[in-house]
Image: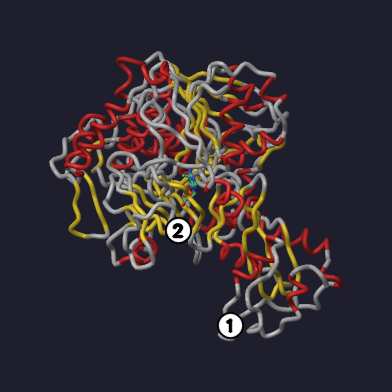
Amino acid sequence: MSTTIDSTLNEKRTFTASSDFITKATVNAEKLAILRKAAAEDHEGFWGDLAKEHISWHKPFAALLNSNRAPHYSWYDDGELNVSYNCLDRHLSTRGDKTAIIFEGEPGDTTHITYSELHKNVCVFANALKNQGVKKGDRVIIYMPMIPEAVIAMQACARIGAIHSVVFGGFSAESLKDRIEDTAAKIVITADGGNRGGGVIDLKKAADAALDKGCASVEKVIVYQRTNTDVTMQTGRDIFWNDAIEGMPESCEPEWVNSEHPLFILYTSGSTGKPKGIQHSSGGYLLNSIVTMQWVFDIQDNDVFWCTADVGWITGHSYVAYGPLATGATMLMFEGAPTVPDAGRFWKVCQDHKVTIFYTAPTAIRALMKAGDDFPNAYNLSSLRLLGTVGEPINPEAWMWYHRTIGKEKCPIVDTWWQTETGAHMIAPIPGAMATKPGSCTLPLPGIAADIVDNDGNIIDEPNKGGFLVIKKPWPSMVRTVWGDDDRYQKTYWAEFDNKYYVAGDNVRKDEDGYFWIMGRTDDVLNVSGHRLGTMEIESALVAHPRVAEAAVVGRPHEVKGEAIFAYVVLREERPESGINEELTKELRSWVGEQIGAIAKPDDIRYADNLPKTRSGKIMRRLLKVIARGDEITQDTSTLENEAILDQLQGKS
Ligand code: PRX
């Protein structure tokens, strides 16, 4: 977003935490210096010591980093553990009666679940999964609303060594089917519905539609009843959650797995093809989720931690399902949308449950900022002590609003840069130890060798010169492979600089203080409301419509969403008169919603007789982006086959 880049380029303000915050912080400047020194002196030993300190191993590891199969790396190869044991059992003697999850549903229903209760619920459901035939290594699809049972299902999989793949409830039946088939899942866990945005999302109906289209691997479907909506149950295949857990024992010996055993697969968009299944490990993944809870979120025993992300995204894995529980924290889960019944809902939830740490996406902050200060001002937000953001660059204006209106100028803001592939925060402030700057994710965490390189892979040392964001050394929670497509793993993340660096796909610059400023993606991936969407994915969905011949999708800046989806469409029929056909536009939008999910619906559709292409037939995306932004065309267009279409593309004829 050019406006963001321009304004962040000029951003010179710095903010430090209050002395009270610093005094109580888990990591202060002194401790941070020790961590950085240890990591610099012995990268592997540093991660080895942390893994010993923070994880309860069933069989201790001797091996640290294994690079024999680079660019495939593994950590703690000979160690054995169970992630669910680390999240639950090990807290029972000290925190059994402590609240693990505070849940608030969109209708306002609330529940508190202690660590002992959660442990019991996970054991019971783990036994139910076993009873349904799930074994270590089997894939389990979880397609659920944001309710505790989603976390219970994930933890139960981890407990028995099954590999879960959570599919965001906003994705369509078609997307669900793709993920079921790619993982060859044996079981689907879903719900009748979920409450969202004042209505009900019919999850079971979507799951049925997916299963009707194929998904031969699926043997059972477990259905949690959340909304009590009518569902069709297929005899022999479908079973209600309550029936599945009936009579199941309340204890379940954890399956001790190798540290590298896959914990989960999570799909994310890339610039080509279908979304890729990012495969994470058990031990390494768990470690980074724990240390970042402590370093970045400064998690302490009396905190109420609220990460608003859905469990369908990586943020909901690391900072809802795993990190908070592994650190014995109390966390809040909220089912609904931030604006239901009104734009004060998040702030009311913060007040009612005395939230101390609040973590959300810039898009939500911008939307709530737009709704006006009366909403937050109506609630008592004095419990808050730390705020966080994730998923996209935050513009300094939104950062300042968050700082003043929500944090009352006393809460540090941690702007955390990371990705589905990195498993946990990579570049982020350690709030009790360093200053923050609005719009910057600040400095790489200890043991994270993030840097910037030019086109030839040379490190850029010059301040404020943009380049590719790379990670120069392996870290424990890194992606292990792309499920079923290892070639794609190697090509996407390593090939660019001869396997030397992990290539993140982001453009970034460092300022005079070495602070990182993310400037956007280097590939054809959009960031819509903090969610990654491949332009090609949306184009494929559009051309699958019988009336569409060709489509090109680009992003344009959007005040709230960060980026909006702009589609240029060439029809198989005559172009509509003056380029307007509202009915068709509506149809194409809902078509894309069915193919991918509502988040992928184009905001704008413009019809043209053809697309601007170079002589070699390549679509001139740069030109399309300029037009989508409504900017003046300054580039040379004389190579265009048909210059006259420029008027159509610009919506002038
Ligand atoms: O472009 C970066 C952006 O989101 C991408 C990762 O998306 P995803 O895998 O869906 O994970 C999102 C949640 C971790 C990155 O490549 N991104 C993420 N965090 C930030 C960010 N851009 C700027 N600032 C951030 N804090």
Residue 621 vertical position relative to residue 199 in the rendered view, above or below: below
Residue drawn 81% across the image and 70% down it:
652
The kind of residue on which mark 2 rests is Lys
Instruction: Please give the residue where the numbered disc 1 appears in the rendered image.
Output: 617
Q: Identify which residue, 18 or 482, lies in the foreground.
A: 18
Residue drawn 71% across the image and 84% down it:
642
Q: Is residue 653 visible?
A: yes
The kind of residue on which mark 1 rests is Gly
Image-based side of 253 in relation to 416, left or right: left
Asked which secondary structure carries label 1, the reply is: loop
Image-based side of 189 in relation to 347, left or right: left
Q: Identify which residue, 531 or 133, lies in the foreground.
A: 531
Residue drawn 28% across the image and 44% down it:
476
Where is residue 362? Give x, y as percent.
57, 40
Quick one: label 1 or label 2, which is nearer the N terminus? 2
Instruction: Please give the residue where the numbered disc 2 appears in the rendered image.
Output: 276
The CB of the residue at mark 2 lies under 8 Å from ligand 1:
no
